[in-house]
Image (cartoon, grey):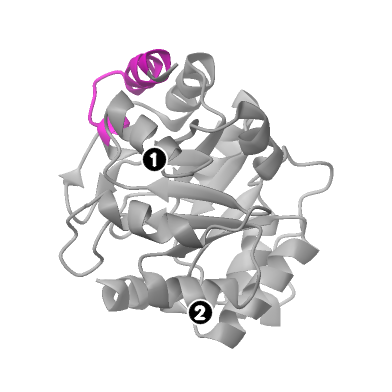
Amino acid sequence: MLEKFRAAKADEIARLIQLEKTHKLPAPLTGERPDFARALWETGPGAVIAEYKRASPSRGEINLSVTCEQVAQAYKDAGAAALSVLTEETYFKGSLDFLARMAPAGLPMLRKDFILHPLQVVATAATPASALLLIARMLNSKELRDLLALAQAFDLAAVVEVCDVRDLEKAQGVSPDIIQVNNRDLDTLTCDLSVAESLSEFKREDQIWIAASGIARPEDVTRMVEAGYDAVLVGTSLMSEGDPGAALGRLVRRKA
């Protein structure tokens, strides 16, 4: 699947390269962005990053009936610490425009996409996103280090995602502030929360760790908190409901 995702980004990267050649790249956003890391620290263990996710390779279309604006406000009202916004178009029916449309809710936003080229970081900096995702398995160590440094230069938090010990070793080699452990097997697309539990022993005290995928119930959140995670990212289980905000409200209330 990762090679399919890589191929799907080729046109986007080519467009950005052409924009750079013609000096038409969008300028970085001016002004302060909501602080992604602080939002997770202040909310405490079990902070929920609620995701706007219209479709996925494993589920197909999930929920196209609610707008990104509606979901952003509903998530804020329900107690989300931050938002995750799928911007990949081919497999997830996302759009970079969602970031600007969801910004009025006032929560820090993670751009969740397949970031492979420095110009994608530049493009992200032109949006109201507070953070972007870097998937360790899709990048070599130099690429990961360079993209992380470029994100930081634009005051964007970089969430480095890992799926196993090998990914984690690569990630820790660039000393990120935030690590996300994906419980989903990227080959079979199945989820297993024991993945996050098994990697938690390597957590560094000065890092924020996020558990993602397969989290649907309050007891799942509790399980990740007990394993040492600071936050959880929840998407499919919320978006599968007719009212994602109400689904988050039930999750947050029962978690508390």
Q: Within 10 angstroms of label 1, few (less than 14), some, or many (20 or more) residues?
A: many
Q: Within 10 angstroms of label 2, few (less than 14), some, or many (20 or more) residues?
A: few
Is 165 a magenta residue?
no
* Residue appearing at x 17%, y 53% in the figure: 58
User: Residue 133 shows which numbered tag?
Assistant: none
User: Residue 14 shows which numbered tag?
Assistant: 2
Q: Is residue 14 left or right of residue 88?
A: right
Type of amino acid at the residue the image marks with label 1: Met
Q: Earlier in the sequence, mark 2 or mark 1?
A: 2
* Residue appearing at x 40%, y 15% in the figure: 249
Give the SS element for disc 2. Answer: helix
Residue located beneath label 1 in the image? 224
**141 shown above or below 113:** below
Name the spot of residue 211 as percent of width and height, x first: 42, 47
Q: Is residue 110 left or right of residue 200?
A: right
Name the spot of residue 232 as percent of width and height, x first: 44, 39
**168 shown above or below 90:** below
Where are the magenta residues, as a range?
A: 237-254
* Residue appearing at x 56%, y 77% in the figure: 117
Distance, label 2 to label 1, CA atoms, is 39 Å
Q: Is residue 144 left or right of residue 255?
A: right
- What residue occupies the far front of the structure in this picture? 201
- What residue occupies the far right of the structure in this picture? 31
Q: Main secondary structure of the magenta part?
A: helix
* Residue appearing at x 54%, y 21% in the figure: 76
